[in-house]
Image (spheres, rainbow, N blue to C red):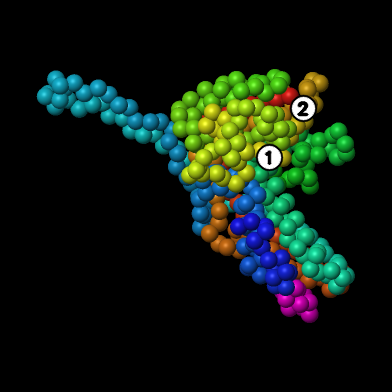
């Protein structure tokens, strides 16, 4: 569903009816289900990772998802062994598990009643679109940049501490700014934590250390090993700053050249070496050469990062309860001559195989 297919006037009338029904009372009321479903459609359209990564319905708040930690072994079977009835050595698949936990993103939006009185149609359409757009952006940022570390006054978080103002760190975190990034460890964090652990669980990174070249992508593909065997399962996620560089490379096969019958996902920029490329505006361009934000030791803070991964590794959890998947609460506050919209969403996220992710760091910003 695209934004052009949504009847804004019809949506506005439904919201107006809901507001009128709640105006004479106090307390909380839910806005129409249809309005929430429209916003969900916009979010899924604008966040390409919703269609790129596997999703699991969750009827409980916490679920355990199995993963393989060791494969079976195959052996030769000779004629002599067959005639002697000799069995091959036994081997069993080793399994582990990851935990998916539903957590909540919520907003608190007070709106003065005088604004409704003098322009409800235009205002509510803008509000609806802003809620959907911001939620899609926040989802992208959470899945890519999430980091649960709060130690060191947030300086140990891969996003660094939030610093307001031009030239500081607006993409950083603290107790009240971008704090939704504390919900889960995202893709950048999964790769960097492996490096910190000595690479025992993968630790795949490619140090670009300057201008991006296709040789760096080839190195990243090699780093993924068996996870790169099927190119249809690979995706390269790049910041907007790198997107403009890739558009000038003749090796980028844009979607208009795919040919008939090709499957194209929302947000797909093109393909390089058969790897689908997606661009996003939430990857920071003020990182150091290791892929983190750090002012320690005079670290260079003008590089960015990209992510190559097997899309079967991340997993998104969605609640089966519709109200927890996404809803908008309405709370009337007549003593303040205003009402409050409270959009909220439950989501879970985890990475099954950290070694199926490769972070390309130190990419020069142009």
Q: Which residue is mark 2?
A: 366
Residue 248, labelled with which disc?
Answer: none
Q: Position of residue 46 (x, y in %)?
A: 65, 49
Residue 43 in the image: above or below residue 151 = below
Q: Image quadrant for the N terminus?
A: bottom right
Residue 199 visible to an observer of this rendering: no
Q: Which residue is mark 1?
A: 280
Horizontal side of 272 relative to 229 (left or right) equals right
Residue situated in front as seen by the camera: 248 or 283: 248
Q: Position of residue 366 (x, y in %)?
A: 77, 27
Residue 246 visible to an observer of this rendering: yes
Is residue 291 in the magenta section? no
Horizontal side of 313 relative to 109 (left or right) equals left
Q: Position of residue 39 (x, y in %)?
A: 66, 59
Residue 303 in the image: above or below residue 68 = above
Name the magenta segment's main secondary structure. helix
- Residue at figure coordinates x 18%, y 21% from the top left: 78
- Residue at figure coordinates x 48%, y 25% from the top left: 225
Q: Residue furthest bottom?
A: 24
- Residue at figure coordinates x 51%, y 54% from the top left: 57
Horizontal side of 353 relative to 284 (left or right) equals left
Q: Which residues are magenta?
A: 15-27
């Amino acid at each position: 569903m695209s934004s052009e297919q949504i009847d804004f006037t019809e949506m506005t009338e439904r919201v107006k009816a809901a507001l009128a029904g709640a105006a004479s009372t106090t307390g909380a009321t839910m806005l129409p289900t249809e309005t929430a479903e429209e916003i969900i459609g916009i979010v899924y359209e604008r966040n390409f990772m919703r269609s790129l990564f596997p999703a699991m319905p969750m009827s409980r708040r916490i679920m355990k998802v199995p993963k393989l930690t060791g494969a079976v072994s195959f052996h030769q079977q000779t004629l002599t062994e067959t005639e002697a009835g000799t069995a091959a050595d036994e081997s069993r698949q080793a399994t582990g598990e990851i935990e998916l936990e539903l957590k909540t993103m919520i907003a608190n939006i007070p709106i003065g009643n005088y604004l409704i009185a003098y322009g409800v149609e235009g205002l509510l359409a803008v509000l609806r679109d802003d809620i959907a757009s911001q939620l899609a952006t926040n989802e992208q940022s959470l899945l890519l940049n999430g980091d649960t570390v709060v130690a060191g006054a947030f300086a140990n978080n891969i996003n660094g501490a939030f610093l307001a103002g031009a030239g500081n760190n607006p993409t950083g975190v603290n107790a009240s700014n971008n704090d939704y990034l504390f919900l889960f460890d995202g893709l950048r964090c999964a790769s960097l934590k492996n490096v910190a652990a000595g690479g025992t669980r993968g630790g795949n990174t490619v140090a670009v250390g300057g201008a991006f070249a296709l040789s760096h992508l080839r190195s990243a593909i090699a780093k993924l090993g068996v996870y790169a065997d099927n190119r249809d399962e690979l995706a390269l996620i790049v910041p907007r700053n790198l997107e403009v560089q890739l558009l000038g490379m003749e090796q980028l096969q844009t979607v208009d050249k795919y040919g008939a019958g090709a499957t194209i996902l929302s947000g797909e920029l093109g393909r390089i070496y058969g790897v689908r490329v997606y661009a996003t505006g939430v990857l920071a361009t003020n990182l150091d050469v290791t892929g983190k934000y750090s002012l320690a030791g005079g670290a260079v803070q003008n590089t960015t990062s990209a992510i190559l991964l097997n899309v079967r590794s991340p997993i998104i959890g969605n609640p089966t309860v519709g109200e927890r998947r996404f809803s908008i609460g309405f709370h009337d506050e007549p003593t303040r001559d205003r009402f409050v919209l409270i959009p909220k969403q439950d989501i879970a996220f985890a990475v099954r195989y950290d070694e199926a992710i490769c972070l390309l760091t130190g990419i020069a910003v142009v």
